[in-house]
Every structure is written in structure tokens, then in C-alpha cells.
Amino acid sequence: MKQIIGFALFWFAIGMLVMLVIDNSFIGLLIIVICLAAGYFLFCHC
């Protein structure tokens, strides 16, 4: 379980770094929605 939390925190930090680089909030929101949808389908869908 610690490895999963560490993996999630690592990618969370990468996402925060990307949002520092991207100044456009619409593009950031679009990336968030795409990543949430991809994460849902990869993790929750069998």
C-alpha cells in the first residue's frame, strides 16, 4: 500500500510541476479532466 501511495504522490508532484509551467487555466483544466477520465477507466474499469 505504501508503494501505491508513493506512486500517486510522485505523479501528483509531476502534475503540480506541469501546472507551474502552464499559465493557461483552461488548458490545465482540460488536462485534469483527461487525466481523471483516463485514471478512472484504467483503474476502475475491468
Image (cartoon, rainbow, N blue to C red):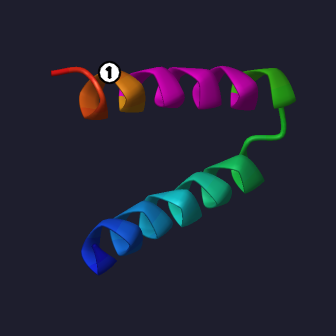
Residue underneath mark 1: 41
Indicate the position of residue 7 as horizontal and vertical percent values.
Answer: 34, 66
Q: Secondary structure at mark 1?
A: helix
Going by the image, does 10 lie left or right of 21?
left
Q: Which residues are magenta?
A: 28-38
Residue at 28% in and 73% down: 1
Magenta span contains residue 29: yes
Q: Of 3 and 29, which appears nearest the observer? A: 3
Q: Of 25 and 37, which appears nearest the observer? A: 37
Q: Quadrant of residue 8?
A: bottom left
Going by the image, does 31 lie left or right of 43?
right
Magenta residues, dominant SS class:
helix
Amino acid type of the residue tagged 1 in the rendering: Phe
Identify the image quadrant of the C terminus.
Answer: top left
Disc 1 crowd, CA 10 A, few/some/many (<14, 14-19, 20+): few
Furthest-left residue in this view:
46
Up the image or down, 15 lies above or below 35; here it is: below
- Figure disc tally: 1
